[in-house]
Amino acid sequence: MSHPIKLAGALVLIGISPAFAHTIVGNRVFPATLTIDDPGVNDELVLPAFAYLQTSNPDGTFGPITYSLAWEYDKLITPDLALTIGNEYDWQRNPEAQGWSNIDTEAKYVIYQNPEHESIIAAAESVDWGNTGSPSSSSLPSTPFTTVTTKIFGGKGFGDVSADWLRPFAVTGEMDFSIPTVSINADQSLNPTVLTYGATLQYSLLYENSFIHQVPDFFNKLIPSFEGIFSTPISNIGPPMPGEFSPYETTGVVGPSVYYIGQYFEVGVMAQVPINEASGRHVGALAIIDFFLDDIAPNSIGKPLFGAPPSRANPNPL
């Protein structure tokens, strides 16, 4: 998702919200991570995703506290193509403001997949539709222009290596290029094109329990991770203004996360640590509940509209 608001310090929290899904490639489960999207396509429902961050002002004082609740529905058209729709409700304190973000849609296609080597590559085109959220008269209006984003995703599990200690590890990455359809606003301010990029490093106790050795029941469905996402304006950038953060500054968050993978759902939480003052103040939080419709209702709403369901190895054979 891509829902800019009028707070520079909340750019990562609200302005770069990703799409969510989980993916199985061979014996590898890639969870629906909280900073970037995973590299696959599935029938899923995110309800809800939550975010919180304390922003800061350029003079070092505390800025507004920002929150969001998001939803998203992913629908397989074919085993390799999915369409997504979602948006979020944002609110802040000090000063009080609230409103719906724009509706976001996405078409995502899996370009390459190798189950034996737990590798996958996908691409997507996402559209944040201007004026589909709260009106300009609201306290937190949605962006009045549309933004188009081209995305590429990748994932690699290390289950094909010989060293057992490495096999539970996996990495994923995402890179986005966002172009607003309006370059100059009525007040002559500029809407920059933005490069967004992020990655995760995962250690799957689910994989370790299934294919290396058993771990205690409390831990055997967990996937701890360390992840981060960053955003850099790259063109159509206005000059620095006194009393504001530099428009050229990269913003982002990093932090540890953990995901619980159940049979029909996933729960994830993350501590998001701002990389600089422009990104936020103090540690924030992200959380998600993701329902696997392809497992809940595999013969109805959980199957592709066209073609057979994706073939999957059993990620937990023991």
Image (spheres, grey):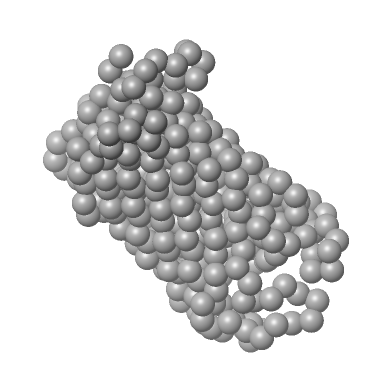
Q: How many marks?
A: 0
Of the 4 image quadrants, the one containing the C terminus is top left
Position in image of residue 73 (x %, y %): 40, 42
Residue occupying the far front of the picture: 163
In this orientation, which residue lies closer to the viewer: 179 or 96?
Answer: 179
Q: Nearer the viewer, residue 83 or 208?
A: 208
Residue in view at x 56 percent, y 77 percent: 191
**Quarter of image, res 293:** top left
Tell me: 80 left or right of 208.
left
> Which quadrant holds residue 151?
bottom left
In percent of width and height, residue 195 lies at: 48, 69
Q: Is residue 315 left or right of residue 284?
A: left
The residue at the point 51 percent across, 59 percent down is 2
- Horizontal arrangement in the rendering, residue 225 relative to residue 276 (left or right): left
Q: Above or below — where is 154 with respect to 159?
A: below
Q: Residue at x 30, y 26 (%)?
A: 315
In the rendered image, the vertical position of residue 59 relative to residue 162, given as above or below = below
Residues 257 and 87: in front is: 257
Q: Is residue 24 above or below residue 154?
A: above
Residue 180: x and y, percent? Answer: 48, 74
Q: Is residue 95 visible?
A: no
Residue 79 position in % (x across, y down): 20, 42
Q: From this viewpoint, is residue 234 visible?
A: yes
Residue at the image position 55 percent from the left and 70 percent from the top: 232
